Image (cartoon, rainbow, N blue to C red):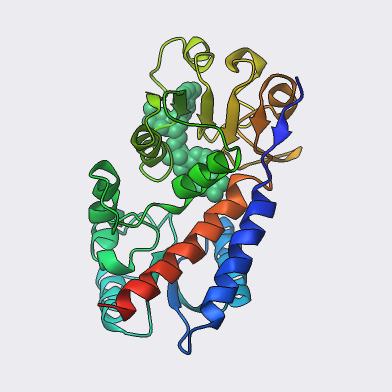
Amino acid sequence: MTAQILDGRNLATGIRQQLKEKIAQHRQKPGLAVILAGNNPASEIYIRSKQKACREVGINAQTFLLPENVTEQELLSLIEQLNLNPEINGILVQLPLPTHLNEKNILENISPQKDVDGFHPYNAGGILQKRPEAFTPCTPKGILRLLDATRCKLSGLNAVVVGRSQIVGMPTAHLLLNHNCTVTITHSHTRDLKALCRTADILVAAVGKAEFITQDCIKPGAIVIDVGINRTEHGLKGDVKFADALAVASYITPVPGGVGPMTIAMLLENTYEAFLKQQHS
Ligand code: NDP
């Protein structure tokens, strides 16, 4: 079997084009505040691509660059101002934060209505309670859109999610459960991970280890979603050995060009949704 490539870049381009057309119909532009504290080079690359994507669809992105030694109080007072600013519909704090800052406390202080990353406890809990008004975190939301694009019926499928982070693994597992998949969440203490992975009709790899998932982990015909972004001496690699997945899976997302572009497209979509909700509130 040669797997079909689930082309996230192509799918994201379509979503961005549709958003651009919708935003053009409004007199006012949606506004997104992007906060970066410190000088993490990877974060700088991520926020540049988010700014560019915003510009292209007509979202007004304002970036706030704070020094590495910014105090928690300074960051919280910026968030408070942005919460009250009617021109700002979404607030994104780029993670990871410098270690002296309490990430949970900072994310909790973003207004849930402007939390377009979906990391506030209200929105994180909203997935469990299937609250339609809650924002879904961008990477898990993008993964579900990729699965949608396969046109496979998800209900009843066995899904295995490798990784249980708050931003990827856990919310993805809950979204799959909400789509009536039978979900197994695995992590660094899981026994016989390969055997569990081989039960998966849908295998989501969010481990952060280059080419961790090999052919012996993949059930023939499985849909494989590779979330990993690992910089190696051989270039950017996913968490899945791409050639192995290509040989046995029915679908595989490439790295780059799979989940990554969908994450950014979902950020734009969440910002537009926040804008619409705030216009009507
Ligand atoms: P984290 O480091 O927060 O979580 C990694 C998870 O993998 C943990 O739950 C950990 O288990 C689990 N894990 C680690 N080693 C093993 C192992 N040997 N066997 C089974 N499970 C293991 O990473 P993130 O979830 O934030 O990110 C995962 C990957 O996805 C990274 O490469 C990241 O760069 C990428 N990413 C990509 C995005 C995109 O847009 N494409 C967006 C966000 C992330 P435990 O909990 O027990 O420690």
Residue at position x 53%, y 53% in the image: 263
Which residue is situated farthest in the bottom direction here? Answer: 27
Query: Which x, y percent locates residue 17?
Result: 63, 67
In the rendered image, the vertical position of residue 202 relative to residue 87, given as above or below: above
Residue at position x 56%, y 82% in the image: 24
Q: Is residue 44 left or right of residue 181?
A: right
In the rendered image, the vertical position of residue 142 relative to residue 18, given as above or below: above
Q: Quadrant of the N terminus?
A: top right
Query: Which x, y percent locates residue 245?
Result: 68, 25
Q: Is residue 133 left or right of residue 38?
A: left
Residue at position x 66%, y 40% in the image: 6
Residue at position x 68%, y 48% in the image: 257
Q: Quadrant of the C terminus?
A: bottom left
Front-most of residues 181 and 85: 181
Q: Is residue 217 left or right of residue 122?
A: right
Q: How many marks?
A: 0
Front-most of residues 91 and 105: 91
